[in-house]
Image (cartoon, coloured by chain):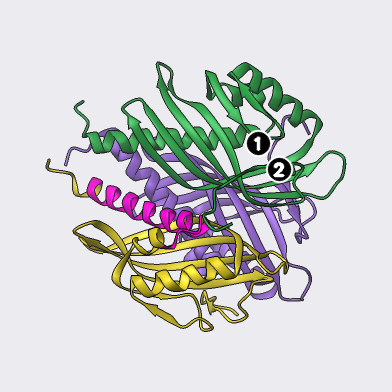
Chain colours: A purple, B yellow, C green
């Protein structure tokens, strides 16, 4: 089939959006293997200055598995305002809003986070994958991290 | 027109997404007739173990009408993370995130629900309709139901 | 290219959705110039009966700039349930859910708003622009405005 380039980009953006949704679903269902499989082998993930960067899907899997098993009793990651831009036929960047709710295993107050995901996506032979993820925060309530990357508000 | 099958599925998923949005809008605007018209005549709806299943659009209409008239003073159903998969040309399943806010008529505290809709959709001669809906909860605050279907977190 | 009309409408709705996302992003990043550039020169904006209508992108820019510099320390505008309908090839209307979180400069409690944007969009030689915006509220908590346009719930 000789697909219209505009349609191909629509289909790409839909596939990438599905990747972001799958990330949330696997996180909230506590499935670190399935979550890590959404990333490239060399993916860089940065949840904030208190966590440091994670390099590689395998390291991400281990890091997320610890958090899911020891910190969170339940989570819910609601994404919206998804803006995806191709920077080449096989590479794209994304800016996504996150509203996340968390319940903790130790019984402290539930927390909420109003944040952003900055993503880089790469098309691989197996389909689109997340090549990098950076979490930024507009604000939070009772969140377990004190310092977060800011969204870069012009008038702070 | 000889539509590209990939484009046809995009258009289907958009029509189904509109159905989910219309459900939220009619619920929040307290329009049970318009809400029930989005379902197949034999639709099965399950809001949780305390409610029991509702069978048929007519029974759903009556059940929702009672809740809208007696329990809720205002509601807001925000859906996101919508994942729709065809299981045939005229049938699809959906997994959708719900963030819902509710105000009650009797003045108790407002509630919030972080949940999921599991849908089955069917194409009818009048267009896509909701054939089944199951509500699951990741968590809630001050919600009027105590027991809910869980989202199935692997590490509870 | 002789684009399928159904595909053209898909592309239009995606471009319009991007406009709504850009509005949120520029608001939350405190960029009033970039925000105002999303509107037609004659755009009418109505945030509620306490604000009165703003007429024109330039007046909107000034009004938003004051709010961003004096009232809000941080905001996060999460949009979902976006329903866009063409009312002609170059005009469309939209009904969008808003969940907004606000932190204030004077240290009062953070607020939340569960609302709706009613939009009118127009295709201009520079692309789609917002021709009108009306904000309606289903409910709020600790919001800085007391009176808001209601969403029009049938059974109040």
Residue appearing at x 19%, y 49% in the figure: B5
SS for dot 2? loop
Residue A45 in view in this figure: yes
A2 versus A61 height, above or below = above
Identified at 46% across, 60% down, the residue is A22
Tell me: residue C38, above or below residue B54. Answer: above
State which quadrant residue B139 falls in: bottom right
Circles 2 and 1 in contact, beta carbons < 8 Å: yes
Which mark, residue C48?
Answer: 1
Look at the image and tell me in which quarter the C terminus of chain B lies: bottom right
Task: Specify whether B132 is left or right of C23.
Answer: left
* Residues at discs 2 and 1 both on one chain: yes
Which residue is at a point 36% across and 33% down the rendered structure image?
Answer: C12
Q: Secondary structure at mark 1?
A: loop
Of callouts 2 and 1, the N-terminal one: 1
Which of the 4 image quadrants contains residue A56? Answer: bottom right
Give percent across and percent down for residue B125: 18, 58
Residue A46's x, y, as percent? 64, 51
| Mark number displayed over residue C147 | 2
Tell which of A9 and A58 is nearer to you.
A9
Q: Nearer the viewer, residue B151 or C43?
A: C43
Left or right: B53 in relation to A114 = left
Q: Is residue B13 magenta?
A: yes
Magenta part of the chain: B7-32
């Amino acid at each position: 089939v000789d697909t219209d380039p505009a349609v191909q980009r629509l289909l790409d953006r839909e596939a990438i959006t599905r990747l972001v949704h799958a990330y949330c679903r696997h996180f909230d269902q506590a499935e670190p293997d399935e979550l890590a499989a959404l990333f490239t082998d060399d993916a860089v993930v940065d949840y904030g200055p208190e966590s440091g960067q994670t390099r590689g899907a395998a390291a991400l899997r281990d890091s997320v598995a610890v958090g899911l098993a020891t910190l969170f009793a339940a989570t819910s990651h609601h994404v919206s305002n998804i803006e995806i831009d191709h920077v080449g036929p096989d590479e794209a960047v994304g800016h996504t809003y996150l509203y996340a709710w968390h319940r903790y295993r130790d019984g402290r107050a539930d927390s909420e986070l109003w944040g952003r995901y900055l993503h880089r996506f790469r098309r691989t032979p197996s389909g689109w994958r997340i090549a990098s993820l950076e979490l930024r925060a507009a604000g939070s309530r009772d969140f377990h991290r004190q310092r977060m990357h800011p969204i870069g508000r012009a008038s702070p």
